[in-house]
Amino acid sequence: MSGGGERTPVEVAVGVLVERDAQGAEGRFLLTSRPPGKVYEGYWEFPGGKLEAGETVDQALRRELIEELGITIGTTHPWKIEIFDYPHALVRLHFCKVYEWSGEFEMREGQTMAWQTLPVEVTPVLPGTVPVLRWFAEERGFIQATHQGV
């Protein structure tokens, strides 16, 4: 790092929307593309965004998914936290699984959405998304590549 200073992580709430079958088994999950004009434009990720001052992860995720996708989510299930060092920012990603939502999906930032299973078919995958695919693979006993390389 230049200047020897420590960077403070940007706190980010991430929604891992997962469909479940009648028996409760997890199925497809939602990925969205990064919108035009943003860093890593066109890369695929799980939706979410930065926490605003005084917000909890749950509050930020609820606000972001309304702003980005037009949906209202049910209970958030905190899952994992990962720090990722991108060239433009150090981020602390708070991944929450979400199984219930209401409303019609609207891509309000010009992004694209895709329901995926392993291995994901969309490319390229944002580097911070790769660990989540690995966690899904571990949970589901999936032993092949989780995504296509860039």
Image (tube, grey):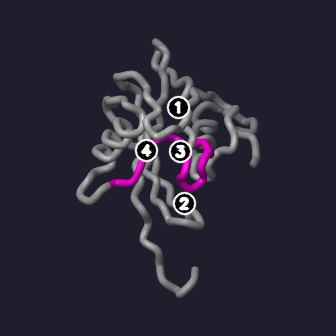
Image depth: mark 4 or mark 3 in front: 3
Magenta stretch in the rendered image: 36-51
Q: Residues within 10 Å of mark 4 (few under 14, many from 20)?
A: many
Q: Quadrant of residue 119?
A: top right
Q: Give the residue number, with chain letter if any, for mark 1.
A: 30
Q: Give the residue number, with chain letter if any, for mark 3.
A: 35
Where residue 128 sits in the image (x, y, percent)?
57, 52
Q: Earlier in the sequence, mark 4 or mark 3?
A: 3
- What kind of element bears circle 4? strand
Image depth: mark 2 or mark 4 in front: 4
- What kind of element bears circle 1? strand
Q: Earlier in the sequence, mark 2 or mark 1?
A: 1
Q: Residues within 10 Å of mark 1 (few under 14, many from 20)?
A: some
Where residue 20 sits in the image (x, y, percent)?
48, 21
Is 55 left, or right, of 93 in this rendering?
left
Q: Earlier in the sequence, mark 1 or mark 3?
A: 1
Q: Amino acid at mark 2?
A: Phe
> Do the residues bearing badges 2 and 1 touch, measured as CB atoms within 8 Å?
no
Identify the residue shown where x is 53% and y is 38%: 111
Q: Give the residue number, with chain letter if any, for mark 4.
A: 48
Is 83 left, or right, of 58 in this rendering?
right
Q: Report, in whole angstroms, how far the alpha carbon at label 4 lies from the one at label 3.
A: 12 Å
